[in-house]
Amino acid sequence: MTLSKSHILSLSFPRWAMVFVACAAFQGVGRSQMTVYGDDDDYTYATREGVEFGVNIGVYRGFPLSAYFYDGAGDHQLSDAGSRIWGIQERLQQLQGQQLTHPVTGILNEFPAWNIYSLPLMQYKPSMFFGLKAAKFWNPETALVCHVDVAQVTAEGAWSLSTGLLPDQGQGNEDVRTYPIVGKEQRLNVALGYRTSIYIAEGASWALELGGLANALSVEENYVVMSPNVGNALYEVHLLTAVGNGAGGTLSPASNVLTQWGLGFYAAGGIALEFDEGGHIELNVRASRDNLQLGTETYQGWNVAAFVTWMMPSQLGDFVRASF
């Protein structure tokens, strides 16, 4: 059975955990004790061989350049023929001319000669991401790893409107008001790489990864808010709409625009800690150089993620019953 993009992106974290806990019950991880002799203390560690599964939870931050796809400039195009992305000026004019009962139309009608004063400086907010990890170990220092991670990424900025009114208290020569603009997208990252480790002490090691990364990106929303606060849905004006007008000139918001794929590479580093009853916790930082496809445009830059990975032990029941 082939899963569609919407099925993949709609998987919730608890369901992923249940699926991979079931997989962990069948993983074959051979372990034996090996003694390492040093000048000071001798210690032992468990070798790692076989397939292991894990869960990633962390924070993701996109590079700012691609956030400008949502700046409302009116010079961006979608590759999806059924959707359109508007410029702020053009969309507000369309709204004022055809949707007379919309609350934002009432605001615009109070401004005698309104005009866009400035477009926003855009950036991505840090966002949570969740994922799964599979690793094939030949020994503790050598493994082939695969990550599948998803994140909902939000771009934000502030645009300015000149109302044409006189400024308050005679300050300046224009009445300029600032409003938020928001863009949202879903990202799926699939990474395949080589992992090696360097032992620090018994039960602890540095972990390094290098490999390739493919990303799938789907545009969800792009809208301005004619209110100082994001989240005031009454005053939202969608710039991402379906093609064609409905009754009374109403435009339907478009979402989940056609998913597009890009390729890149990544490097990651962190520390891995082993539990007495088996299993590992890894603290990782990953930087990926990605090609992001947004509409008809390609953006290249570095995306950064910091995350924790729980590598499930071969005997999951023993781990759950372990006392910490």
Image (cartoon, grey):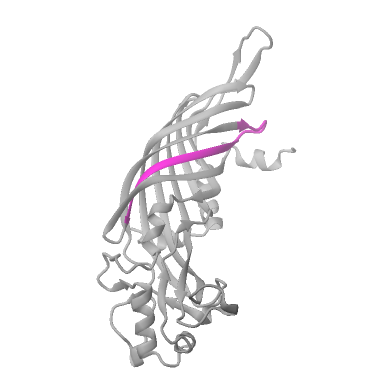
Q: Residue furthest right?
A: 323
| Residue drawn where x is 48% and y is 40% of the image | 286
Q: Can you say whether 204 is above or below 260 in the image?
A: above
Label the magenta part by its dominant secondary structure: strand
Give yes or no for residue 277 being in the magenta stretch. Answer: yes
Residue 136 or 256: which is nearer the viewer? Answer: 256
Q: Residue 157: where, in percent of width, then height? A: 48, 63
Q: Can you say whether 158 is above or below 216 in the image?
A: below
Give yes or no for residue 195 being in the magenta stretch. Answer: no
Q: Can you say whether 97 is above or below 59 in the image?
A: below
> Can residue 252 be seen from the camera position used here?
no
160 relative to 80 in the view: left or right: right
157 relative to 14 in the view: left or right: left
Using the rendered view, name the quadrant where residue 184 is placed: bottom left
| Residue drawn where x is 47% and y is 35% of the image | 268
> Can residue 45 be seen from the camera position used here?
yes
Q: Residue furthest top?
A: 39
| Residue drawn where x is 60% and y is 35% of the image | 279
Residue 132 or 64: which is nearer the viewer? Answer: 64
Identify the magenta region: 273-293
Q: Residue 180: where, in percent of width, then height? A: 50, 69
